[in-house]
Amino acid sequence: MSKEIQIGIVSVDNDLHAIAIQNLFEKRYHLKCHIFKIDCISGTSSFNWSNVDELEYQSLLSNSTGDVVNIRELCVIWWRRFSRHQKVSSHVVDERHIDLINNDCEASLLGLLLNTFSGTWISDPTATRLADNKLIQLKAAQIAGFRVPKTLVSQNPQVIREFCRSLSNKVVVKPVRGTSKVPLFTQMLTEEHLASEESLHLCPAMYQEYIPGHRHIRAHCFGDNIYSVLIEAEDLDWRQNLDIPFKPFELNAKSKQCLLQVLRVLNLKMGVFDLKLDFDGNLIWLEVNPQGQFLFSEGLSGLDLTSAFINFIYQEAQQSYHQGCLV
């Protein structure tokens, strides 16, 4: 068994964030950082777990270079991205077989990691999945003391129209979860939206009080450290156009404490928060991404978020190591 610090990154194939963090971590600390491409399990032969004999049947998983890693030797796992869809061989065409492969690879991976790994999660898989739910986020933000927009999640046309009337129809609409098939941006609600009974009935959507203003905050919380960027954009959803000013921004102490309290409520080690400043300078909650992207913020603002993140995971790994993660 290895006696030095090692970390693992669970993600999908060709994830730029995983590759960038692995390269800088290994270069700076001269320690091993493994990427596990969890959408590429199918077709490999080195996935092993058993309750019979831990010496003979070690909990093994291949990393991105094909090396077999004993999961017990990891001090930290960064739960960066998770997908149940495997890159299945082209000769497997039966949808029933593909569904079986996807389901069993997902269940096996989760079972192996949750049964075997004794180090520090960034962040716990179950906590990450729950925290990704916008309804759960909103409650956590309220508990932490944030000003949260008035919100309705519904597919009942009558209730939706009444809610919108109560806000003089100054309402935005956004998906509750969305889809990986196409980007869906936050939009102002229109009369056409409200008139379409069939569309409103299709599935619940999130209807939210419109917060005027053009100053947005992207706050990157890595442990107890917070690195914020001010984004000035006239568009309702600034993600549609990144040719806009990004610059480092210092939040006040109260706002930082609210962010850290959200992490505690959601049982997260990290989170990337989207917030908005109203015309009076009040900070308004929008959402948190438990595994949010940060490389584009670094590139557009000059804030060295990559170094901040690898320092964070190294500190977490050191603490886990000294607490006996390799025992």
Image (cartoon, rainbow, N blue to C red):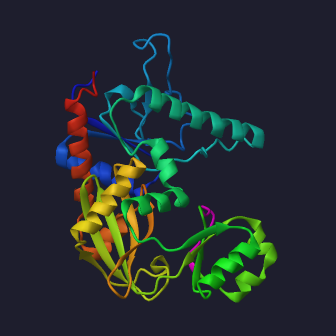
The count of marks equals: 0
- Which quarter shows the N terminus? top left
Residue 161 screen position, x and y as percent: 70, 80
Q: Which residues are magenta?
A: 178-187
Q: Quadrant of residue 56?
A: top left
Q: Name the residue: 41% across, 71% down.
A: 147
Q: Is residue 161 visible in this depiction of the protein? A: yes
* 181 sits left or right of 45 in the view: right
The vertical placement of 111 against 264, above or below, is: above
* 274 sits left or right of 156 in the view: left
Q: Is residue 12 visible in this depiction of the protein? A: no
Residue 188 screen position, x and y as percent: 59, 84
Within the magenta stretch, is there residue 150? no
Residue 279 screen position, x and y as percent: 37, 88
Within the magenta stretch, is there residue 184? yes
Which of 32 and 285 lies nearest the eye of the viewer? 285
The vertical placement of 169 against 223, above or below, is: below
Residue 277 screen position, x and y as percent: 36, 80
Q: Quadrant of residue 148?
A: bottom left
Most extreme residue toward the right, as rendered? 198
Which of 190 and 237 lies nearest the eye of the viewer? 190
The vertical placement of 284 against 70, above or below, is: below
* 106 sits left or right of 54 in the view: right
Q: What secondary structure characterizes most of the magenta part?
A: loop
Q: Name the residue: 46% across, 31% down.
A: 114
- Which quarter shows the C terminus? top left
The vertical placement of 221 against 196, above or below, is: above
